Image (tube, rainbow, N blue to C red):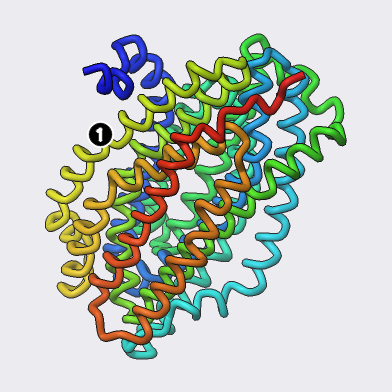
Amino acid sequence: MQTLKKFIGDKRFYLMVLSVAMPIMIQNGITNFVSLLDNIMVGQIGTEQMSGVAIVNQLLFIYNLCIFGGVSGAGIFTAQYFGQGNHEGVRNTFRAKFWIAAILTVIAVLLLGTAHEPLIRLYLTGEEGSQDMNAALRYGTQYMKLMLLGLPPFMFVQIYAGTLRETGETVTPMKAGIAAVLINLVLNYILIYGKFGAPRLGVAGAAIATVISRYVEAAIVIAWTHAHRKENPFADGLYRTLKVPSSLVKQIVVKGTPLMLNETLWAAGVAVLMQCYSVRGLNVVAGMNISNTIGNLFNVAFIALGDSVAIIVGQLLGAGKMKQARETDTKLIAFSVTLCVVIGAAMALISPLFPKLYNTTDEVRHMATIFIAEAACFMPVNAFLHASYFTLRSGGKTIITFLFDSVFIWVVSVPFAYVLSRFTNLSIYAIYLAVMSADLIKCVIGFALVKKGVWLQNIVQE
């Protein structure tokens, strides 16, 4: 019974956790739900359109996580400065985030704006006819050119929303996210299908709707932050200068660079895994797209709880409460894994039903059903890995998280998928399951690192 108490909190503990996690969960849930509807709407047009959009979103995913990693590196310091009550420290971390995100966005626009066609072609390697491949390339190119216009507002949302969450304000980013996704949904319906007198734009309509919604979200978050300076003391004099103290720059480079590289390399690793799977045909790309879309919706629980680990544990470490940080972290990880056993079972149950919503072939639907069921089985594993990752990150152990996350995917998962997809006769289902099973090695490593307490550090101590 005493052992169980280590893993189970009281009512007050879960209310505190849910007060942080629920707004993030709701925002991510609504975002992913609308993304799901967006995906179904594009999927209603045809398989080639769906595949072209899926490939571009896989490439944009690398940029998204690159920005997330860049601002999160400085965000480790934001959470701990806030826990310390140092508002100037929070301002300086915000300015650091601005420079990091602006540089990454310029690089992404230049790279994806000029090299999108060869990058999309990497995924068009299966046995289907060249006509299907050319159509997927055409739709993907059209979608990419428009989506690049949405990168600047996405960048500002990440900077502002991240800082607000790290300083304890999770409701406003949630409200802005909800407003944006509702606008996205309505515009998707109007522009993809040409409703209410609007032209039928298909894939281009989906991109335009997403870009407009991102500008709305950025406007809401920025306006609220500066209009409520009492609740957000860091906003006072925020743009008085964009200079960042050299001592903080050095700390962010040391702690944040591995984190940014980690997110970027991990996302690139996921994109390469998809490319390995795509060798087995364009149908695999379509099936994986359907599976990942519903998977993203179910994953919001453990992703929000991982963010909660970073915020709650980070603030406790900044306040020097090491014992409480360890106890809280153990209960948070246990809660996340237990919750995801239930959520994974629910996802497995709907696996035969969800693919029927798409206007695609029976083969693609069958593939998607099996991919969804396989992903559902590994949800508790992913919950543990995610919470362990954010535990290590909250204490500034970014070199370890780099080895734990992106080095693992490139050294183990990618070579494994490459060899299995190209040099064996295994089915795509067996390959997908085998590659996910390799993550069990990470579970053992993560358990050892968290238990050892290498992450129990205050990195903003005066």
Residue 364, x across and y down, in percent = 22, 71
Residue 304, x across and y down, in percent = 41, 34
Q: Quadrant location of the N terminus? A: top left
Question: As rendered, which of 93 and 314 lies closer to the eye?
Answer: 314
Please report the residue visible at 54 percent of the width from the left and 59 percent of the height from the top. 407
Identify the residue position indicated by label 1 in the image.
338
Q: Quadrant of residue 363?
A: bottom left
Question: As rendered, which of 430 and 74 lies closer to the eye?
Answer: 430
Asked if 266 appears above or below 91 in the picture, the reply is below
Which amino acid is tagged 1?
A: Thr
Residue 292, x across and y down, in percent = 33, 57
Please report the residue visible at 30 percent of the width from the left and 51 percent of the height from the top. 295
Residue 52, x across and y down, in percent = 42, 70
| 233 horizontally vs 131: left or right | right
Please report the residue visible at 34 percent of the width from the left and 53 percent of the height from the top. 195
Asked if 390 appears above or below 123 in the picture, the reply is above
Please report the residue visible at 80 percent of the width from the left and 20 percent of the height from the top. 237
Q: Is residue 13 visible?
A: yes
Q: Is residue 223 visible?
A: no
Q: Quadrant location of the C terminus? A: top right
Q: Quadrant of residue 192?
A: bottom left
Give the total of numbered labels. 1
Q: Residues within 10 Å of mark 1 (few under 14, many from 20)?
A: few
Asked if 441 appears above or below 52 in the picture, the reply is above
Q: Secondary structure at mark 1?
A: helix
Asked if 445 appears above or below 148 in the picture, the reply is above
